[in-house]
Image (cartoon, rainbow, N blue to C red):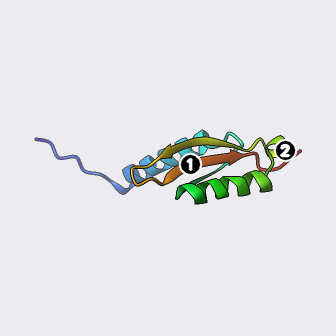
């Protein structure tokens, strides 16, 4: 049985590759934030974002949401960084 040894440069290379992948996946120009809140709080947070960043100017939208087993709502909201 062969034993694989990892050198610090291997770890550094793997972390750098991962950072490049994450950066390229998120360099689409959108600002995103994910929340996990009780249903009422989630609704209030979404209203707050839509009030601060109106859809017409920032293209704000709920990108993803789901209800967790404990009843809380997890959602990601996205918007453009600034209005033109």
Image position of 12 (left or right of 80) = left
Tell me if 5 is positioned left or right of 40 in this view: left
SS for dot 2? helix
Task: Residue 19: give x, y in percent of width and height.
Answer: 53, 48
Say which of 61 and 13 sits in front: 61
- At a point 62% along the width and 43% down the height, the residue shown is 26
Asked if 45 appears above or below 19 in the picture, the reply is below
Q: Up-down: is 1 above or below 10?
A: above
Dot 2 alpha-carbon crowd within 10 angstroms: few under 14, some 14 to 19, many 20 or more: few
Q: How many marks?
A: 2
Specify the quadrant that holds the C terminus.
Answer: top right
Q: Nearer the viewer, residue 4 or 82?
A: 82
In the rendered image of this protein, does residue 66 appear above or below residue 45? Answer: above
Residue 52 in view of the camera: yes
Residue drawn at (29%, 51%), measured in percent from left and top? 6
Q: Are marks 1 and 2 in contact (CB under 8 Å)?
A: no
In the rendering, at what x and y percent does residue 36 appear? Answer: 52, 56
Q: Residue lying farthest left?
A: 1
User: Which labelled disc corresponds to residue 57?
Assistant: 2
Residue 37 appearing in the image: no
The quadrant of the picture occupied by the N terminus is top left
Residue 20: % across, % down:
55, 44
Q: For mark 1, give the secondary structure.
A: strand
Q: State which tag comes first along the sequence, 1 or 2.
A: 2
Mark 1 crowdedness (10 Å alpha carbons): few <14, some 14-19, many ≥20: some
Question: In the image, what residue occupies the spot 67% across and 46% down?
Answer: 78
Residue extending farthest to the right is 84
The residue that disc 1 covers is 75
């Amino acid at each position: 049985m062969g034993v694989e040894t990892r050198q610090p440069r291997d770890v550094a290379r793997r972390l750098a590759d991962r950072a490049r992948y994450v950066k390229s996946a998120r360099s689409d120009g959108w600002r995103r934030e994910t929340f996990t809140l009780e249903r009422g709080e989630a609704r209030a947070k979404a209203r707050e974002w839509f009030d601060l960043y109106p859809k017409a100017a920032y293209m704000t939208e709920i990108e993803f949401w789901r209800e967790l087993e404990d009843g809380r709502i997890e959602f990601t909201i996205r918007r453009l960084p600034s209005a033109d």
